[in-house]
Image (cartoon, rainbow, N blue to C red):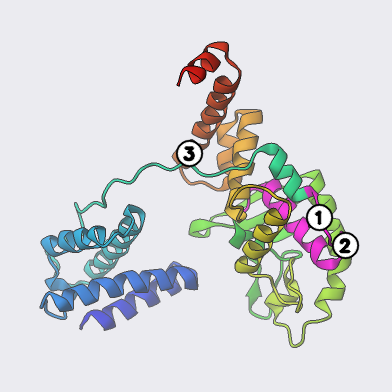
Amino acid sequence: MGFDTDIGSYLESLRTQRMLSPHTLSNYGRDLGNLARFAAASGTSPDPEQVTHVQIRKLAAQLHAQGLSPRSIARQLSAWRGFFTWLAEQGRPLERNPVDGVKAPRRAKSLPKALSPDDAIRLVAHPMPGRDPEAVEQQCNRAMFELLYSSGLRVSELAGLDLRYVQQDGYRSLGWLDDQLSEVTVTGKGNKMRTVPVGTHAAQALGAWMQARPAVAAAARLATPEDQCALFLNSRGRRITPAVVQKRIKAHARALGIPANVHPHVMRHSFASHVLQSSGDLRAVQEMLGHASIASTQVYTSLDFQRLAQVYDAAHPRAKKRNSQD
């Protein structure tokens, strides 16, 4: 059938059966396109069944030599492996999955960045210097930033929140606020839903934003049901996008003089690190973050150890002596 046709059919199956987001589908398409171009350059038959294990290993090595990160190579291998698994399920004559046994180069384990508690509180509690704290955009920002830090949401989950659960006119909420119970329900990775609490300060900021929101919503013309239901709006009354949230929080941190590259995921890391430091409850943090595996959450124990090591180096007499000798 040929690579292009097979890739198109595979992506359609991911869209309809696994309901992957357009962004994820775009990444799959790009990764599979790399495989198709490599096969064509290698003189392989246009049928994917002709791709061999050796060729996959060679392509992974080429990507590494070109400077592609181990994480990106692992993502592409995963996309290719899924593609060939799907082909086999369609009855295509594959002797084996050619990606099986091919691993990406090892990558250095990097710890997530997290703000100090003081910087995190300063970022969410203080308006941008020189701006009216009662301005509508400031109220929207504070509600969003407080909620990111209060509940550990991903930025896509935050932007996808609705005022309440809605199912009408072909639209159904994937995330919504329940202000009576002070909690939000979101749909995370793998279409896994979870409900997380909203802290007192975040609830207060949300209340102020809810008072200002109708004036912003009135600015929208011919708004879709998705925009009409959105909890957070841009200046045109449309649902806010993750890119806008990222831009606003970065500008806010810079204006406050916070010496870090602050983006929404930093707030998620800060939430997890600070809750774990205070409670020590790894399972609770795992549930609130929506991690499928506790191994993903355990990285925050390393962050806590780093903090303890810094305290030791700064306070212990023997550490001070060691530092002075260096």
- Whether 144 is among the magenta residues is yes
Left or right of residue 37, residue 200 in this image: right
**Can residue 97 be seen?**
no
Segment colored magenta:
125-153
Q: Are marks 1 and 3 in contact (CB under 8 Å)?
A: no
Secondary structure type for disc 1: loop
Q: Disc 2 to disc 1, how far (Cα)?
A: 8 Å
Q: Indicate which disc residue 163 carries.
A: none
Identify the residue position indicated by label 1 in the image.
Answer: 127
| Position of residue 139 measured from the top left corner of the image (x, y, whole percent) | 82, 61
Q: Residue furthest top?
A: 318
Q: Residues within 10 Å of mark 1 (few under 14, many from 20)?
A: many
Identify the residue position indicated by label 3 in the image.
Answer: 294
Q: Residues within 10 Å of mark 3 (few under 14, many from 20)?
A: some
Q: Quadrant of the C terminus?
A: top left
Left or right of residue 102, residue 164 in this image: right
Identify the residue position indicated by label 2 in the image.
Answer: 132
**Which of pointers 2 and 1 lies earlier in the amino acid sequence?**
1
Task: Name the amino acid, label 1.
Answer: Pro
| Position of residue 219 measured from the top left corner of the image (x, y, whole percent) | 81, 81
Nearer the observer: mark 3 or 2; the answer is 2
